[in-house]
Amino acid sequence: MKRVGRPSAAQVAGFIACSWLLALVAIWAVQQVHQDLHEHNELPPILHWLRDAAVAVPLAALAIGSAALLVRFAFGAAGPGPGRGRTAAAWLAWAGIAAVLFSLLSVPGNQLHGFLFGAEEEQIGWLQDALIDGSIVLGASLVALVPTALLGAWAGRPAATRPAAGQPSGPTQTAPAGTSASPAFAGFTHAGGDR
């Protein structure tokens, strides 16, 4: 297996931003469904949302990083290299895999949340609660990550194939060096490989 170099600062920043985005969107969706349930020490809604999202960020990071590794393994030939970015299929696979992994990780995360913060329990069984919450997280994760993946696929196209603002789309004669995106850490690399 080919060894991958250290991620750039931009890749790390993208990884952190995607982790926070995923956690914030998914936790907001779950809290909207559970707004009639309360905790023992109730916080104002914004603080409650930010606290719960902060608790979920490590799970989101695990899902995003694991999905990136799986995509690198499955789409290795379409991965970043000199002058090329990941394909749209690789980006969408990353979004789908990360969403599924995060929804699966959210089930024990919800149980941990109830234990840590004394959240009220719904009057339904554990399995039904897990399926409902997991499906909410899956939907919210797709809402957050699919546009991110499409943006990454667009940004990952060589600069010569991206139309300039106000210009009709079409191929150009030369392909100048520019930035390309990598779903591995949802950050940017420079043409010629990772820095």
Image (cartoon, rainbow, N blue to C red):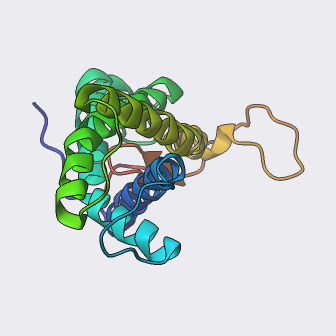
- Residue 189 appearing in the image: no
* Lateral position of residue 126 relative to residue 154, left or right: left
Quadrant in the picture for residue 77: top left
| Residue 146 percent across, percent down from the top left | 54, 37
Q: Quadrant of the C terminus?
A: bottom left
* Rendered residue at 46%/36% (across/down): 136
* Rendered residue at 33%/32% (across/down): 124
| Residue 182 percent across, percent down from the top left | 40, 45
Quadrant in the picture for residue 54: bottom left
* Lateral position of residue 3 relative to residue 163, left or right: left
| Residue 116 percent across, percent down from the top left | 18, 64
* Rendered residue at 24%/66% (across/down): 117
Q: Is residue 117 above or below residue 67?
A: below
Q: Quick one: which residue is furthest to the front in this view? A: 123
**Depth order, front residue of 22/195:** 22
* Lateral position of residue 188 relative to residue 32, left or right: left
| Residue 181 percent across, percent down from the top left | 47, 48
Q: Quadrant of the N terminus?
A: top left
Q: Is residue 28 above or below residue 64?
A: below
* Rendered residue at 41%/77% (across/down): 43
